[in-house]
Image: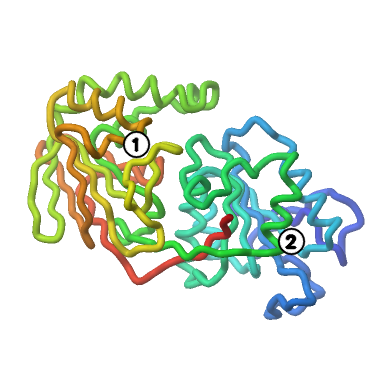
Amino acid sequence: MLSCALLKSPNHLKNDDARHHQGSCPINTAADSTAQATPQSKPTLLLICNPISGYSDKHWLKALCERLDHDAYPWARYDTQAGGDATRFLAEETWQADLIIVAGGDGTINEVASGLYAAGRLDVPVLPLSTGTANVLARELGINGLASSHKIDKIMALIADSPTRRVHLPLINGKVMLLMAGVGFDAWVVHTLDSNLKKRMGKLAYVVSMLKQVPKASRRLYRVISDGKNQTVNAAIISNGRFYAGSYTLCPNGMLEESDLVITTISGNTLTFILALCAMPLGLMHKCPGVEQFSAQEVSIEALNEAEEPVQLDGDDFGLLPCTVRCSEHSIEFLHR
C-alpha cells in the first residue's frame, strides 16, 4: 500500500502532526501545481525516506524538516514501507517537485531513479542523503556523511546552490542500474546476507557472509559476452563508476558521466579470490592475478550450470541470471559537492 505523509504544508497545517494520504501526494494545494521555481521563490521539495535504512543519528531528519519549515520551503514527505515503494510511488502517483531529497541507502536511491525513469521525469534533480551501509553513490558525489543533525546547514546550502552532476543510467534487463551489478561471489554475499545481522552489525555482516562464500567462489562458472568478446569466469562485476562496497576503488578510470560500462572479471581458485579481496581496500584489485578489467557498451552473462544464480544490483538482490546490461541514452541529475 502506498501512503504519503504530508508533514507540513504552510498554508494548511497549524502544527507538526503528520497527515496521511493514499494516492497523490499534494505539497501546497494553494499553489499552482504546474508552477516552476523562480529565483524569487523556494523550490518545491519532495522527501523520500526509507525509515528502516540503518543509521546511528535518528534525529537528523526531524531537524531537517524543522529547518525546511523555518526557511519556508514547500515540501512533502513519503516514507517507504517495502522494497519497490519509491519506484511505484514516483511512477504511478501524482506528485510535483523541483528537487527530490532521498534519505536511504543505494538501493533506495536506485528505486527513486527507477521511478523517475518510468515516469519520464529524469529532469527532476535528486539529492541523495545516504543513510545506508555502503553509500557508494554519496561517496562518488562527495556528499557522504551529510545525513547528520550537525550538518543541516551544509544540506541547506546544497539545496540553495543546487550544483548538479549528470549521471549516466545503464539498463539491466531493461531496468535502471545506477552503480553496479554483480554475479558470482558478490551476488551470493548479498543473496545470503543475514538481514537481522546487518541491522545489528552493519558492514561486519557482509564480512561474515563473505567468509562463508569464499570457499565456494571458484566452483561457479559464468559465460560473459561483451562487445563480441566471449569468456568463462568465476565472477563478474559491471560498474558505472569508481567505487565498490563503500569507498574502495574498483575502477580507477570509472566515471559516472560516461556512457561506458567497466567489467571486472575474476577467474581462478580460492587463493585468487582471497588475494583480490585483500587488495580491494588498497584499490589494487584490478591488478591482481586472475582479475581482468575492460570497458564495453553491452555485456550479457549466463550461468554455466543448472543451478539458479542470483544477481545483485546496487547492493540488493535483483533476480536471477541470465542478464544483459547495456549503456543507454538516459541520464539523471544528482546534487554534488
* Residue drawn at x 85%, y 63% as measured from the top left: 10
Q: How far apart are labels 2 and 1 at the CA level? A: 41 Å
In this rendering, is residue 27 above or below 248? below
Residue 119 visible to the viewer: yes
Could you say which is closer to the camera, residue 7 or residue 241? 241
Quadrant where the C terminus is found in the figure: bottom right
Q: Which residue is mark 2?
A: 75
Q: Residues within 10 Å of mark 2 (few under 14, many from 20)?
A: many
* Residue drawn at x 74%, y 37% as measured from the top left: 59
Give amino acid for label 2.
Trp
Q: Which residue is mark 1?
A: 283
Q: Position of residue 179 (x, y in %)?
A: 39, 50
Q: Regarding mark 1 in the picture, which secondary structure is present there?
A: loop
Give amino acid for label 1.
Gly
Could you say which is closer to the camera, residue 102 or residue 167? 167
**Camera-side mark, 2 or 1:** 1
